[in-house]
Amino acid sequence: MKKTRIIVVDDSALVRSLLTEIINRQPDMECIGAANDPLIAREMIRDLNPDVITLDVEMPKMDGIDFLGRLMRLRPMPVVMISTLTQRGAEVTMKALELGAIDFVAKPRIGLAEGIQELSDQIVEKIRIAASAHVRRLPSVSVGSGVPSTEVATATAPKPAIKLLGAISTEKLICIGASTGGTEAIKEVLTKLPADSPAVVITQHMPPGFTTSFASRLNSLCQIKVSEAVHGERILPGHAYIAPGGKHFRVDRSGANYIAIVEDGDPVNRHKPSVEVLFRSCAQVVGRNAFGVMLTGMGNDGAKAMREMKDAGSFNIVQDEASCVVFGMPREAIAHGAADEVLPLTSIASTLIAKLSSVAADRYRV
């Protein structure tokens, strides 16, 4: 068996030791080096050519984010971030995902040794996913590059073919599911939706403490308003609602209105929030007024429920393999016969707008 070769980069000797031990316990992995700062890591990467690196955020000599940005421009490779579960840690993690990190693990602030051991299964799973992920170089323009967010949104958002989306947006609902690689994929779709878009409901696999920063970052980029879903709130056109980390999110009705249901519960398909929960509710409550979108992610969460959406009359789009970081969830949706169209990520928003415009044109005979 060819083992996945990993370099651990962390300024804590304890964390380096724990991660090395966890990795070396796996029959398909080996830790080939551990560095306490990015400058040492740079030499190790050059000399040892690892398959994956784990990278701490806050380190001496060079910030982990600065190092990641340089790495993804000069020598793109799979990176799993090791983040601290704090507000700043969450904000920095969102930036790391934007720069090209495949995924992250949130390490506890207290009980570090015990906490990392408890996270060992999650750590090795994310390393395995990263090893098989599609890694891309940094885009030429990214958030934080000096381009104001409003300009990014204006530049990337196409105009609808007709100006009647608002007339149908109260009844239509766009339902998005994603996992690994999904934060940037969701951004690509949402930044291209016009202000009068139908409401968007989103489940992205993410732990507690990180979805607030994720929603805030998207809200600064989009023409629609983006926020975490709040239990019992009305789902409004021109808004996107993200499942809070560690909670399930589904859609219900109150009279003529869609409302958000945010609740605890057991994991579904090993996930909480689960795409399956959201998509099943859309099949049952929204039916033919739903537009389903399955984006990049590992596993099969949401595939069966997306087929239920299609059977209920929804129009479903699945991201294609070439543009996915990980093709697992889209592949499963296709295998279940849930896809009406399989598209590159950059074509999904324009296809949604065209489809909605066509519905509006038929409705009002434009």
Image: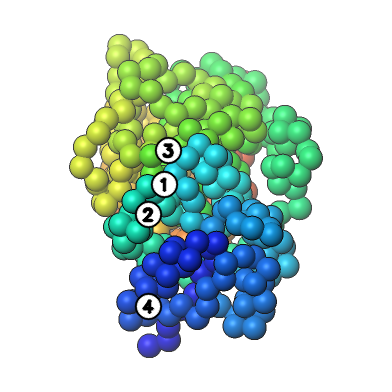
Look at the numbered disc 4 and give the secondary structure of its residue: helix
Q: Which residue is mark 3?
A: 209
- Give whichever of discs 4 and 1 has the lower sequence position: 4
Q: Position of residue 58 (x, y in %)?
A: 58, 52
- For badge 1, the amino acid type reads Arg
Look at the numbered disc 2 and give the secondary structure of its residue: helix
- For badge 2, the amino acid type reads Leu
Q: Is residue 1 visible?
A: yes
Task: Indicate left or right for 231 with 238 as reference.
Answer: left
Who's the residue at 32% across and 77% down the image? 25
Dot 2, crowdedness within 10 Å: few (<14), some or many (≥20)?
A: some
Dot 3, crowdedness within 10 Å: few (<14), some or many (≥20)?
A: some
Give 226 or 124, whichever is nearer the viewer. Answer: 124
Give 115 or 102, whichever is nearer the viewer. Answer: 115
- For badge 4, the amino acid type reads Asn
Q: Confirm or deny contact between disc 1 and disc 2 (CB under 8 A).
A: yes
- Give whichever of discs 4 and 2 has the lower sequence position: 4
Give the residue at the far left of this rendering: 266
Q: Position of residue 17 (x, y in %)?
A: 42, 70
Closer mark to the observer between disc 3 and disc 1: 1
Which label sits on residue 109?
Answer: 1
Who's the residue at 68% across and 64% down the image? 71
Q: For residue 152, what is the image quadrant?
A: top right
Which label sits on residue 136?
Answer: none
Q: Position of residue 93 (x, y in %)?
A: 54, 47
How far apart marks 4 and 1 lie (CA) works out to 24 Å
Q: Which residue is mark 2?
A: 112
- Give whichever of discs 3 and 1 has the lower sequence position: 1
How far apart marks 4 and 2 lie (CA) works out to 19 Å
Look at the numbered disc 1 and give the secondary structure of its residue: loop
